[in-house]
């Protein structure tokens, strides 16, 4: 199996406080890997390190075998941050055209991909609307479309479905599974337990540590739990 993202003994502190404490993870090609944890547990800090936006104080991050930060690898993944990085005064089409050109897609490729990704997030009819007039959920969906524009082999999504209704949330997860079937690796942060169940493997994060990591079914089986929430509470308690 090919490791797409590797974290080796990662620790990070802001000021004097250690926020990430000795995390080791190997994320394989074609898996949907979930980082599950409560607000403030360190999920965003971890994904920022995977993208090379932030360098850990200790340890090393490798993406496709190359040490991060690496400009080569930065072009290769799609990243959807927690706050939408969109140009509010431009239309969705103009935004996606801009992101497509950053990734060096030609005009014809941009046209085709814009149509495909907007269809995927169910925004086709709002293509020429100015983003300022989008709802919060529509902006999240457009951010997802932007992260996918260049058909990346690795997608890193920080809470992608916040503010998205359950029907569309399901359809986004269906799309993620289709991408996975094509060999795309997907890393997703969430604090929603039912989303965690949709991942192939999970790392449960608490106070900057991985308290348990495995497939959702094995995590439940190990402690005879019926829900992921129970697993989280179980390991959370025994670590505090
Ligand atoms: N730039 C920063 N400077 C100082 N502290 C920070 C900084 N960024 C994050 N932190 C702190 O690090 C901890 C982890 O934050 P992080 O955003 O990684 O958590 P999270 O699990 O992603 O939370 P959420 O689900 O709310 O996004 C928090 O205590 C946060 O206050």
Image: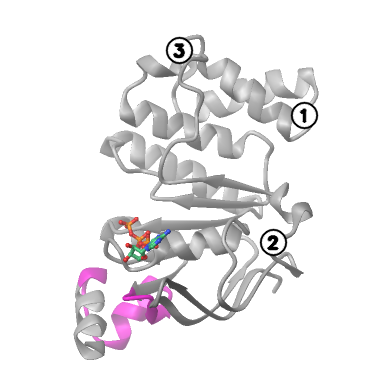
Disc tally is: 3
Quadrant for residue 59, please give it.
bottom right
Neighbor class of circle 2 (other Cα within 10 Å; few <14, some 14-19, many 20+) is some
User: Image point 36% across, 73% down: which residue?
Assistant: 205
Q: Is residue 8 above or below residue 201?
A: below
Q: Give neighbour class at mark 3: few <14, some 14-19, many 20+ (Cα, 10 Å).
A: some
Is residue 158 shown to the viewer in this render?
Answer: yes
Given this view, does label 2 or label 3 mark the residue nearer the observer? 2
Say whether disc 2 or disc 3 marks the residue closer to the N-terminus: 2
Quarter of the image for residue 209 reads bottom left
Report the residue at 37% width, 71% height from top.
216
First of labels 1, 3 by sequence position: 1
Q: Quick check: which quadrant has ligand 1?
A: bottom left
Q: Is residue 159 left or right of residue 6?
A: left
Q: Please, which residue is most extreme toward the bottom here?
A: 238
Q: Residue furthest front?
A: 15
Q: Which mark is residue 130?
A: 3
Queried on whether the Cβ of the residue with tag 3 lies below 8 angstroms from ligand 1, the answer reads no
- The label on residue 105 is 1
Range of residues picked out in magenta: 206-229
Residue behind mark 2: 69
- Judging depth in this view, the residue of 208 and 36 nearest the camera is 208
């Amino acid at each position: 199996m090919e490791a797409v993202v590797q974290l080796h003994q990662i620790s990070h502190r802001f000021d004097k406080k250690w926020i990430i404490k000795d995390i080791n993870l190997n994320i394989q090609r074609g898996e949907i890997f979930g980082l599950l944890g409560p607000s403030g547990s360190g999920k965003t800090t971890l994904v920022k390190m995977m993208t090379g936006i932030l360098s850990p104080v200790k340890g090393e991050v490798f993406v496709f075998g190359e040490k991060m930060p690496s400009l080569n690898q930065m072009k290769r993944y799609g990243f959807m941050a927690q706050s939408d990085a969109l140009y509010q005064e431009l239309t969705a089409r103009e935004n996606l055209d801009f992101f497509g050109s950053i990734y060096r897609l030609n005009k014809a490729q941009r046209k085709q991909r814009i149509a495909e990704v907007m269809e995927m997030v169910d925004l086709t009819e709002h293509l020429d609307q100015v983003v300022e007039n989008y709802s919060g959920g529509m902006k999240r969906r457009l951010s997802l479309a932007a992260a996918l524009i260049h058909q990346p082999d690795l997608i890193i999504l920080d809470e992608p479905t916040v503010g998205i209704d359950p029907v569309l949330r399901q359809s986004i997860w269906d799309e993620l599974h289709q991408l996975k079937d094509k060999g795309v690796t997907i890393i997703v942060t969430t604090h929603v337990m039912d989303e965690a169940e949709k991942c192939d493997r999970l790392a449960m994060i608490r106070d900057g540590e991985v308290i348990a990591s495995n497939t959702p079914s094995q995590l439940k089986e190990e402690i005879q739990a019926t829900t992921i929430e129970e697993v989280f509470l179980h390991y959370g308690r025994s670590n505090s």
